[in-house]
Amino acid sequence: MKLLLIGSGGREHALAWKLAKSDKVEKIFVAPGNGGTGTCNKCENINITDINELVVFAKENSIDLTIVGPEEPLTKGIVDLFKEENLKIFGPDKRGAELEGSKSFSKDFMKKYGVKTAEYQVFYNVDKALNYLENCEYPIVIKADGLAAGKGVAICQTKEEAKDTIKSFMIDDIFKGAGNKVVIEEFLDGVEASILSITDGKTIIPFLSAKDHKQVFDGGKGPNTGGMGVLAPNPYVTAEVKKDFEENIMNRTLEGIQKEGFDFKGIIFFGLMITKKGTYLLEYNVRMGDPETQSVLYLMESDLLELIEAALKEELHKKEVKWRKGTCVNVVLASMGYPGNFTKGYKIKISKEIKEKVFLAGAKLEDGILKTNGGRVLSVIGVGETVEEARNEAYKNIEDIEFTDKYFRNDIGLV
Ligand code: AMP
Ligand code: GLY
């Protein structure tokens, strides 16, 4: 099969690496890809991001299946467009993608189908939102309705902070439209877990749980990032949490997908908060997590392409996903200064021995030389029977990677 994989992150390098292991795969075009997918087995980067141009490429190159990495093309309706052109594609339709594309849409969906989630209110009007803040309990959570590159959520400790946040979202319009509507939500205290899963609209199969480390500094301090490293499986996801999740979140979500009539053959990612009062859904994503994917796919024994093909045929009920035993840690090496300002363009040296344990993200090939090209530059993998073993391996591998301004957290996996 010839595949087209859309995206350019560490997630896409991990997806390309995993898909290339399938005997059925002859070639993977990655659009636009990065320095990792550019040198990955069976892969070739193509410099296209426009959805309409991707349709043309898929037709002209007889692509058998397109797999979408990031949320943006999904919310723009890439799946609907490919289907209109009779091209096979894996991902939810535009309506289903609204579960990630609009916070108010997803909260209303959760409420309608009884999915356990924090209490909330939706506001379109600044004065009403400001007025609501007068009598709230603090901390409170304010979310921009639309996609805001992972920056649209603010946890406000005081009324003043909350008012400033509302003003910056709704008046100063810092997210260019995405914050004109806001969700104001009850603060939940607990530990987070990511559960990625695959669905064909009839069955959902959850993958191994994962623990992201979102803040930039050790001990969970500093501003939020896209994710600084992941431990999988997540030790907080006990059998009891799993049961709570399946009954009160996953199965109700599936019922909602069916009743709303979404055409949803894709990935659904549950962002959970495990609290003393039980497990709550914070958010849906309609794609794999980054860097969750790097750890989860590393432990996946099953052929991912076969799972995707089963989902497209609505035959997931016949499938079981097999996992390697043990634990996987991935530590993100970032550019110093991320998630604020940082410098790009530094040479990256990776010793040969650990190449198979590195997934590149913000890294590009320039005349055959690998250079930093983003905030999160790459992820380094460690595996082991215990968390300690996996951590030791990941941190040892980091010593074999060099670039100027290399920054990483020291406590990934210590939960
Ligand atoms: P979201 O994009 O909704 O996952 O929010 C991003 C991050 O904000 C989450 O990973 C949590 O760390 C935090 N967050 C979101 N909603 C809440 C909430 N209701 N209570 C506490 N933290 C939250
Ligand atoms: N690592 C969190 C995300 O991909 O949304």
Image: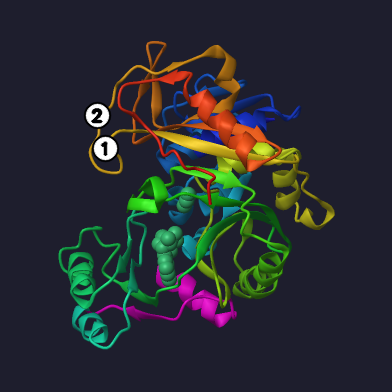
Q: Residue 202 carries which label?
A: none
- Name which residue lies at 45% across and 23% down: 35
Count of marks overlaid on the render? 2
Q: In this view, does 164 lie to the left or right of 116?
A: left
Secondary structure under tag 1 reads loop
Q: In this view, does 55 lie to the left or right of 243?
A: left
Amino acid at pointer 1: Gly
Q: Is residue 330 left or right of residue 124?
A: right
Please say whether residue 77 is one of the residues in the magenta stretch: no
Q: Is residue 238 visible?
A: yes
- Name which residue lies at 35% across and 67% down: 145
- Name which residue lies at 63% across and 44% down: 88
Secondary structure under tag 2 reads loop
Q: Name the residue under label 1.
A: 337
Q: Nearer the viewer, residue 240 or 22?
A: 240
Amino acid at pointer 2: Thr
Q: Which of 281 and 78 is in front in this view?
A: 281
User: Few, some or many C-alpha atoms within 10 Å of disc 1 (few <14, some 14-19, many ≥20)?
Assistant: some
Q: Mark 2 points at which residue?
A: 343
Q: Position of residue 56 (x, y in %)?
A: 49, 35
Choose mark 2 or mark 1, whichever is in front.
Answer: 1
Under 8 Å from ligand 2: the CB of mark 2? no
Query: Which circle's residue, 2 or 1, is located before the other in the chain?
Result: 1
Q: Which of 154 and 405 is in front in this view?
A: 405
Say above or below: 302 vs 93.
above
- Specify start and end residues of the magenta stretch as a single range: 102-125
Q: Nearer the viewer, residue 24 or 10?
A: 10
Q: Where is residue 62 in the image (x, y as percent from the top left)?
A: 62, 30
Under 8 Å from ligand 2: the CB of mark 1? no
* Residue at the bottom extreme of this rendering: 135
Q: Answer whether labels 2 and 1 touch (C-beta < 8 Å).
A: yes
